[in-house]
Amino acid sequence: MAGLSMKNVSKSFANGFAAVKEFNIEVEDGEFIVLAGPSGCGKSTTLRMIAGLEDITAGEILIGGHKVNDVETKDRDVAMVFQNYALYPDMTVYENMAFGLKMRHMPEEKIDREVRWAARLLHLEPLLDHMPRMLSDGQRQRVAVGRAVVRRPKVFLMDEPLSNLDEELRLQTRRELKRIQEELKSTVIYVTQDQTEAMALGSRIVVMNDGEIQQIGTPEELYRNPCNKFVAGFIGSPRMNLFDVTVEQDKTCAVLVFGEHRITLTEEKSAPLLNGGYAGKTIVCGIRPEDFRIGKACKIGEGGSVEAVIQVQEAVGDEMFLYFQVDEIGFVARNGKGIDDHPGDRIRVCPDASRFYLFDPATERIITN
Ligand SMILES: Nc1ncnc2c1ncn2[C@@H]1O[C@H](COP(=O)(O)OP(=O)(O)OP(=O)(O)O)[C@@H](O)[C@H]1O
Ligand SMILES: [Mg+2]
């Protein structure tokens, strides 16, 4: 196993399109790094550059401290698992997993030990004699992972390996992957569009957009301290509510004005706004779904509560999501037990202003949270 280092790595394709720009990261040995971001943001391109399947236009990639820019894929000691994990259809599960080792001329008995070890790890022992067509999607996926695991590579590269699986199997295989990674203490770079998966798997997450790293951090850091509006909106489910407010000044406090509504911030929260010259300007305000109190939980006459129109309540497991509008703008709140009111009814909602995330409208960077 080994760490990975990427320094100012960029990729422009032959048509001039810059798919990855100035990518920098230091990955420690044994970390589970997730590259996350919307479709087309450059995740697969980044992974393919690490694998050596794609030339890099500029920068440096080091695996285990050695520069690999000009090292061929087969000599980089990385193993890839793709979304479309083609198994060899005419080989058994055992042969599929043994194939890469045979190609490396590993002795027969050592191959056997490795394959059986991986099969035990992945709960594939009863299936070793089966042909791929006899397997479920999840089982096939595990064989693809097994094929990578037996090689004991320095770095595992996985590109949306679970996206073909149904929900249940995806969650199960996700837990297995995490367990195996912890057991092997391997370095993993894992690509996904799904922020929930990123949060569940990553020791750190790299959030990308338009070929650029937006932020790198632990799931908790990204959730609590997003550096900009994009990360704030990307991490968290349901997503953070984002809406425009105008900043007014009332002595040493900032007042956020939203339609008829006025919410006064504490002096502490106001300072970065007023010192930053935002008085009189329109900025972007964010609030997470869990930071509302709803209906009776808002005390009567409490400042900062606003009237909302209920759109729909959605039960998700043992949780309720309440969708509502304030002045025609849609919001979502996490609302534990749910409420008795119905679509179209009016209720009071009370956002917790101490938890507001405030963003610069032009740069989209966080001003304060
Ligand atoms: N050979 C190529 N020539 C030109 N542009 C390319 C080429 N390959 C990829 N791209 C573009 O580079 C961008 C990044 O592609 P990439 O496959 O890395 O995205 P991704 O983040 O993996 O997306 P997805 O989540 O949909 O898999 C895309 O806009 C894509 O259209
Ligand atoms: Mg991709």
Image (cartoon, rainbow, N blue to C red):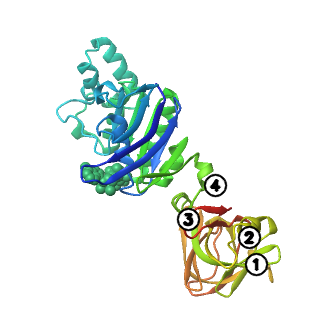
Residue under circle 3?
364
Q: Position of residue 204 (x, y in %)?
A: 54, 43
Disc 2 and disc 1 in contact, CB within 8 angstroms: yes
Which quadrant of the figure has residue 256?
Answer: bottom right
Q: Position of residue 363 (x, y in %)?
A: 55, 64
Disc 2 and disc 4 in contact, CB within 8 angstroms: no
Residue under circle 2?
274
Residue 165 seen: no
Kind of element beneath mark 4: loop
Kind of element beneath mark 3: loop
Disc 3 and disc 4 in contact, CB within 8 angstroms: no
- Amino acid type at image mark 2: Leu
Q: Residues within 10 Å of mark 1 (few under 14, many from 20)?
A: some
Residue at mark 3 to residue at mark 4: CA–CA distance: 14 Å
Image depth: mark 2 or mark 3 in front? 2
In the rendered image, the vertical position of residue 133 relative to residue 260, given as above or below: above
Q: Which mark is residue 305?
A: none
Residue under circle 4?
225
Q: Residues within 10 Å of mark 2 (few under 14, many from 20)?
A: some
**Mark before the other along the chain sequence, 4 or 1:** 4
Q: Is residue 213 left or right of residue 294?
A: left
**Mark before the other along the chain sequence, 1 or 3:** 1
Q: Residues within 10 Å of mark 3 (few under 14, many from 20)?
A: some
Residue 184 seen: yes
Residue at mark 1 to residue at mark 3: CA–CA distance: 21 Å
Disc 1 and disc 3 in contact, CB within 8 angstroms: no
- Amino acid type at image mark 4: Asn
Kind of element beneath mark 2: helix
Q: Is residue 238 left or right of residue 56?
A: right
Label 2 beta carbon within 8 A of ligand 1: no
Residue under circle 1?
249
